[in-house]
Amino acid sequence: MRVSRRGFIQALGGTVGTAALAGGHLAKADVTSQDLERWATPEETKVPSICQQCPGGCGLTVRTLDGQVAGIAGNPLHPVNRGALCPKAFGALQLLYDPNRLRGPMVRDGKRGRFRPIGWDEALGMATGRLAELRAKGLPHTLAVLGGQYRGSRDTLWTRFAQAYGTPNYIRVRCLHPEEPALAHRLMQGVTTPLGYDLRGARCILSFGVGLLESWLGPVNVSLAFAGLRGGDGPRGRLIHVDPRRSHTALKADRWVPIVPGTDGILALGIANALIREGLYDREFVEQHTVGFEEWVDARGERHQGFKDLVLGDYGLLAVSRTTGVPVRTIIETARDLATLKPAVVIGERGPAFGRDDVHTRMAIHSLNALIGSIGVRGGLLVQGELPLAPLPPVEQDSTARRGLEHPRIDGAGHGRYLLVSSAPQVLPERILGGDPYPVQALFLFATNPVASHPDKDAFARALERVPFVVSFSPVLDESASKADLILPDSTYLERWQDDPVRHVAGFTCLSLTRPATAALHDTRDTADLVLHLARSLGGTVARSFPWEGFEHVLKTEARGLWEAGRGYVISTHAEESLRNVLERQGYWAPEFPTYEKFWEALVARGAWWDATDLTASRKALLATPSGKFEFSSTLLRRMVEETMAREGSAAPFVAALGGRDRGDRLYLPAVPLAGPEEPGQFPLRLNTYRLVTRPLGGGRNQPWLLEQPAVHVQASWERWVEVHPHTAAALGIKDGEWVWVESPKGRIRLKAKLTAGTRTDVVNIPLFG
């Protein structure tokens, strides 16, 4: 017997009606065959989107059924990931459908921690009223905005709001920030924009603790580059990974170099010693494109120590080996690999800090790129092209805003010991509790939960109690939101407009853009639209600085620059892209769309614009120092110290923040002090932290799929753990799976012990759970 599809649906409709009558509870069945046919054949759409779980910015294809999100896949046309995804991407579904999401705005009901629902008009009126009151009193600087890990035009809007309103206190909490140049690149090359690591073109990669394949800026993109290193057209490339623990990247490496935590810079200088002693460094590059390698004389006739003398005099291989725990043979072999497997590149942007000598450690590691001539060449460090976005109109400022911006930042960023950083959120509890340099009257929290993530979370909780008006934009009632006066819940990134400029290792210029894949499930709003609303409600110059109706219009204004740039294309099929790239490299480019409206429609429909020909191999563009060369002895750092002395009367806090032990020429060279032998003392073990592939930015506790993903090397999921070497565990009487206390001078934490041979016996490893 054959039954047609329509006949089956009609029969099913009859069955449903019969079942309803048989139950004795329904007088009428409202389900018709037309309803069932609609349910059986829902309207399916596929919307391009962007993963926001880490800085990778992978392209997504979101499948919806009758407007509801039903699945996520990789976008095969997106140049960042070409359809590949890591486990984090699928957590977006649980962010969207999280049962603990707030259904709408909430206001404090009595004491903090108790809330009642409130309408959007009343909620926004409260926020606007408090902001207007502070401006009327001449206190706009007492507003602080604390933002978390996000990118693109949301950061632009918050920056613009702070400037127009009149507060210097827009402070970011970021563990990864690809939109800023690496500190070593800035000090030694003078660059003010991020550089691109051309990993796809490299034949040798030396990584100092960078979780390339799990938790760096773009693990999916890096994995694709790694596949080229292993199976490209040329000879097999080599990956050397320096890390105290045997991470996923270390397992895939040709050489894993277990190192004593905090001695990475010393090892880099030991490798430099071997390169120089054996004559393996790139003499042409060093002689023509660097300064400070040899001893030098300044304009006043004073002699200064050079990098070569520093390295050969202080960082002998035996001393380096004793300090780092790395055998001399390994140091020499690594140096020879860098010199002979060209092009080679060295990466030292480890997530967790390198320790007290963080700045000089990063400089020491980056000096290896200069020694092997990997700056401004394919397979090395290249200029990361700037997106040709149309500039927004200038911010208008009235006298209230100008006076407010004259006040110092409450975190002290850009001055004293925090001269080199744009934000110093770690000091906020102390500054807020002490009213230093002035009391904070209002605090906005966006995309951050400091009561859970700050090193001194208890102090931050007390600090929030001290602030008269706290607004959280969290979509859930997290630890920080629970201490707010007003909660204006943000929509998830599948429910809002989103842009994402790719500024990491991708090796090309790219802007991803997406529209909402689904309507907001609850009465939530995009925080970007709320910023625009607050600005318009304040009126005057603040309102005139935000002339857009919504965030979509901000993005559309900026994207016009892409259409007018005369280069690049909206993503399309691989065959079309290949043809266009060939023509563009030969100097031919033809506009794809006759009008900007057509361009915008295609950009929204396809999800990204990119230019694969914009990664310039230019040493001139990469060397923007006062000397126009790579500086082993940083002129910029020297100027900072001198200007701090002139402005503040003393550079001691800044020097102390740089390690503070080596004065004179060594302060401006990549000099990392060689530590002497340490006595075991009260804390005989060293702590090493790392990021999980499923939670590189921390958090994720409302995404069970990610919590369930096992850490295969220790067979752990859900719970928090500490990794201990079996020999160490045996000496301490610890068994696998036992709960133990891990204690340091800063405090202690209870974790489950997981025994693994993939670590040093003097090191314990704890993932950053967030």
Image: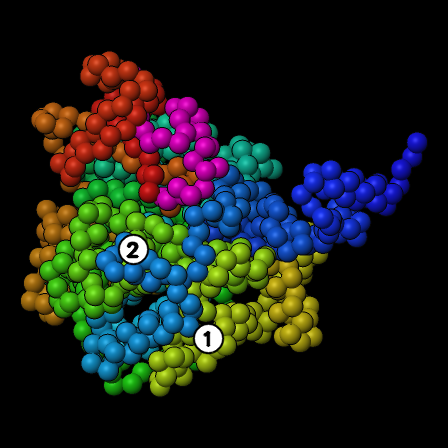
Residue 587 in sight in this render: yes
Q: Categorize mark 2 by other alpha carbons within 10 Å: few (<14), some (14-19), many (20+).
A: some
Residue located 28% across and 46% down the image:
452
Residue located 18% across and 70% down the image:
408
Q: Which residue is mark 2?
A: 114
Q: Is residue 444 left or right of residue 494?
A: left
Q: Secondary structure at mark 2?
A: loop
Magenta stretch holds residue 66: no
Name the spot of residue 652 as percent of width and height, x first: 8, 57
Looking at the rendered structure, the number of numbered marks drawn on it comes to: 2
Callout 2 amino acid: Arg
Q: Is residue 5 left or right of residue 116?
A: right
Any mark on residue 600, and which? none
Residue located 70% across and 40% down the image:
24
Quarter of the picture holding the N terminus: top right
State the residue lying farthest toward the left.
649
> What range is drawn magenta here?
698-726
Name the spot of residue 768 as percent of width and height, x first: 32, 39
Residue located 7% across and 63% down the image:
650
Q: Is residue 258 above or below residue 283?
A: above
Callout 1 amino acid: Pro
Quarter of the picture holding the C terminus: top left
Q: Categorize mark 1 by other alpha carbons within 10 Å: few (<14), some (14-19), many (20+).
A: few
Residue 371 in sight in this render: no
Q: Is residue 575 above or below residue 251?
A: below
Name the spot of residue 343 as percent of width and height, x first: 46, 43
Magenta stretch holds residue 715: yes
